[in-house]
């Protein structure tokens, strides 16, 4: 997977000894605060060339902000970003990075083809516009005005626009949002064809199934931090899918969240529910930190339910 | 950059409303105004020629600013962020907008001059016609950039209002409606600091066989450069999710 097949252009031909410099993506100690909100609170992430990484997390987990800092659209308060050993600006200028952002968009008056043409014109060695449209599965509707397209068609145009620079790294923020089941399947087929060439992909999603089917590796984010990082099997094994419920007088949600093994915390008056990555550690820590806790119960839930709780619940 | 210019011109050519207002409207306005006020005395120039040049300035300014302020809906759509993901440098983005504003301004100005010649019987030498055209055309440069500045600096729901206010102030204080000679002294001094005044003044100088005023060139260039620098800065820093 990490070897570029013959004939595929690779920009990553600079020999670098430093592990960070050799990585496709290297994020070190990223922090970003918007007003009172710590959107990203210390994110470290190394992605090797050829890896396909899913970024999972609820809304507000810091996925989008992390991606925007990675792409150089947002300046981190602290921390460092390197893409293929370069600054994001440099990597972008060399056409190494293609991205599909939620906040990015196109003019309604332009046709799909015109959009991809304009994008292609900005890069040193783009794909042919027709090829990009075909790979994204929108060639048949490329003459439509963007404003008149369905949500799924728009997403494909955006995908074609991200692909047209023939990037070594693709960054996709919820690429299949607004697509139906068939559209989603087609999208991931197109993506698979693309990554078979050894390209690196980082995508954010709400869907565990997409991460399971498509990613080599899953990075789980919550409240601006990475709370789990590994292969799909490793991460799912770390989520034990148990929930601890207890009455905790004077419970402090922030403190509860800091307990080892705790993923997500919900509270209603005294009653708290802890969705756990490791319920054994969490229970020990809960009882020693909050000796006044009572009516404690531990219940199991399905893996899917646990992921839903961890990744799409309110924080 | 070439692709951006071509695309934008293509989009503009599909918008009849835009073309009507930016290109046609100033010429129509000139014909009506000169009919109403044409008999008055305007000093070194006859009134119709004076008004023709004022309307040329008016058309050049409104055309250039209206191209620039289109950046507001583009930002709203996320187009700027999309461009920022490409290698396109900030100055190149600004330059493409300025070129588009020049392309839009040219027919608007030519149309007014043609109306002056054909309908109102204004007579200048060929050299004077060309010089007036060039002065108006180049004089419109700061306004394309000012329009961009408004589009980038102001929240999109307020852009329309700020654009109209800026345009009216530049026209009024630049002496496009009321001759500068009729304004009180402190306003005359103020007018000399505005690119709108100089756009019309240079064209008037050239229309009577004079030469361009160096101070005017400097004032217009300063507006262009300062606004341009601010636009490049804002384009780069424009990362807020809109």
Image: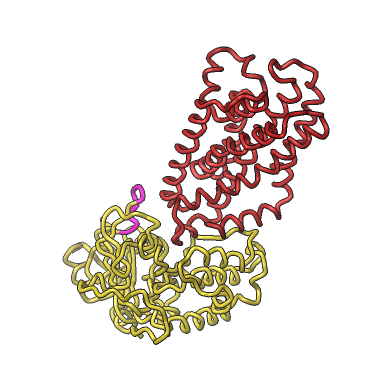
Q: Residue at x 74, y 15 (%)?
A: B41
Q: Main secondary structure of the magenta part?
A: strand
- Position of residue B30 measured from the top left corner of the image (x, y, whole percent): 75, 31
- Position of residue A82 measured from the top left corner of the image (x, y, whole percent): 30, 65
The picture quadrant where one finds residue B105 is top right
Q: Residue at x 82, y 35 (%)?
A: B118
Residue nearer the viewer, A40 or A97 = A97
Q: Quadrant of the N terminus of chain A?
A: bottom left
Q: Residue at x 63, y 15 (%)?
A: B181
* Residue A36 on the magenta span: yes
Which shade of the palette goes to chain A?
A: yellow
Q: Which residues are magenta?
A: A34-40
In the picture shown, does residue A283 fall above or below A105?
Answer: below
Q: Quadrant of the C terminus of chain A?
A: bottom left
In the picture shown, does residue A29 fall above or below B97?
Answer: below
Q: Is residue A194 visible to us here?
A: yes
In the picture shown, does residue B20 fall above or below A290?
Answer: above
- Position of residue A56 measured from the top left corner of the image (x, y, whole percent): 38, 71
- Position of residue A116 measured from the top left corner of the image (x, y, whole percent): 56, 67
Q: Residue at x 18, y 71 (%)?
A: A284
* Residue B12 on the magenta span: no
In the displayed orientation, state which residue is furthest to the top.
B185
Residue nearer the viewer, A126 or B79 = A126
Which shade of the palette goes to chain B?
A: red
Q: How is the image coloured?
A: by chain
Q: Is residue B159 left or right of residue A102?
A: right
């Amino acid at each position: 997977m990490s070897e570029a097949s013959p004939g595929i252009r690779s920009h990553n031909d600079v020999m670098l000894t430093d592990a960070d410099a050799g990585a496709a993506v290297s994020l070190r100690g990223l922090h970003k605060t918007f007003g009172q909100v710590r959107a990203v609170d210390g994110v470290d992430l190394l992605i090797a060339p050829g890896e396909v990484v899913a970024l999972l997390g609820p809304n507000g987990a810091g996925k989008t902000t992390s991606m925007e800092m990675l792409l150089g659209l947002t300046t981190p308060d602290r921390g460092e970003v390197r893409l293929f050993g370069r600054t994001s600006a440099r990597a972008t200028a060399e056409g190494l990075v293609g991205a599909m952002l939620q906040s990015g968009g196109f003019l309604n008056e332009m046709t799909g083809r015109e959009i991809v043409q304009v994008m292609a014109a900005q890069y040193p060695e783009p794909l042919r516009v027709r090829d990009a449209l075909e790979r994204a599965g929108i060639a048949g509707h490329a003459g439509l005005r963007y404003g008149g397209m369905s949500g799924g068609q728009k997403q494909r145009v955006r995908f074609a626009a991200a692909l047209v620079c023939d990037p070594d790294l693709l960054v996709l923020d919820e690429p299949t949002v607004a697509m139906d089941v068939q559209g989603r399947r087609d999208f991931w087929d197109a993506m698979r064809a693309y990554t078979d060439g050894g390209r690196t992909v980082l995508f954010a999603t709400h869907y565990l199934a997409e991460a399971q089917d498509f990613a080599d590796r899953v990075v789980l984010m919550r409240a601006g931090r990475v709370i789990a990082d590994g292969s799909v099997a490793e991460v799912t094994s770390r989520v034990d899918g148990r929930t601890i419920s207890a009455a905790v007088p004077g419970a402090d949600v922030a403190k509860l969240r800091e307990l080892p093994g705790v993923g997500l915390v919900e509270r209603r008056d005294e009653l708290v529910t802890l969705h756990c990555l490791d319920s054994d550690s969490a229970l020990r820590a809960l009882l020693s930190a909050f000796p006044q806790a009572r009516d404690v119960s531990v219940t199991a839930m399905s893996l899917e339910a646990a992921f839903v709780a961890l990744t799409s619940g309110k924080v | 950059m070439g692709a951006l210019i071509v695309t934008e011109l293509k989009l503009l050519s599909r918008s009849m409303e835009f073309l009507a207002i930016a290109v046609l409207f100033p010429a129509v306005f000139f014909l009506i105004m000169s009919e109403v006020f044409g008999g008055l005395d305007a000093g070194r120039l006859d009134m119709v020629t004076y008004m023709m040049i004022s309307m040329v300035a008016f058309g050049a300014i409104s055309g250039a600013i209206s191209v620039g302020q289109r950046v507001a809906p583009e930002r709203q759509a996320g187009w700027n962020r999309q461009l920022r993901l490409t290698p396109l440098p900030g100055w190149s983005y600004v330059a493409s907008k300025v070129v588009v504003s020049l392309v839009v301004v040219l027919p608007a100005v030519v149309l007014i001059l043609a109306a002056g010649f054909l309908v109102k019987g204004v007579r200048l030498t060929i050299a004077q016609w060309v010089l007036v055209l060039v002065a108006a055309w180049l004089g419109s440069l700061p306004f394309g950039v000012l329009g961009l500045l408004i589009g980038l600096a102001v929240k999109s729901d307020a852009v329309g209002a700020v654009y109209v206010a800026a345009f009216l102030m530049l026209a009024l204080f630049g002496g496009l409606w009321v001759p500068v000679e009729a304004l009180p002294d402190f306003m005359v001094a103020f007018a000399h600091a505005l690119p709108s005044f100089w756009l019309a003044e240079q064209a008037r100088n050239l229309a009577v066989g004079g030469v361009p005023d160096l101070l005017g060139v400097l004032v217009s260039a300063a507006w262009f450069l300062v606004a341009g620098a601010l636009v490049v800065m804002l384009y780069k820093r424009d990362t807020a999710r809109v």
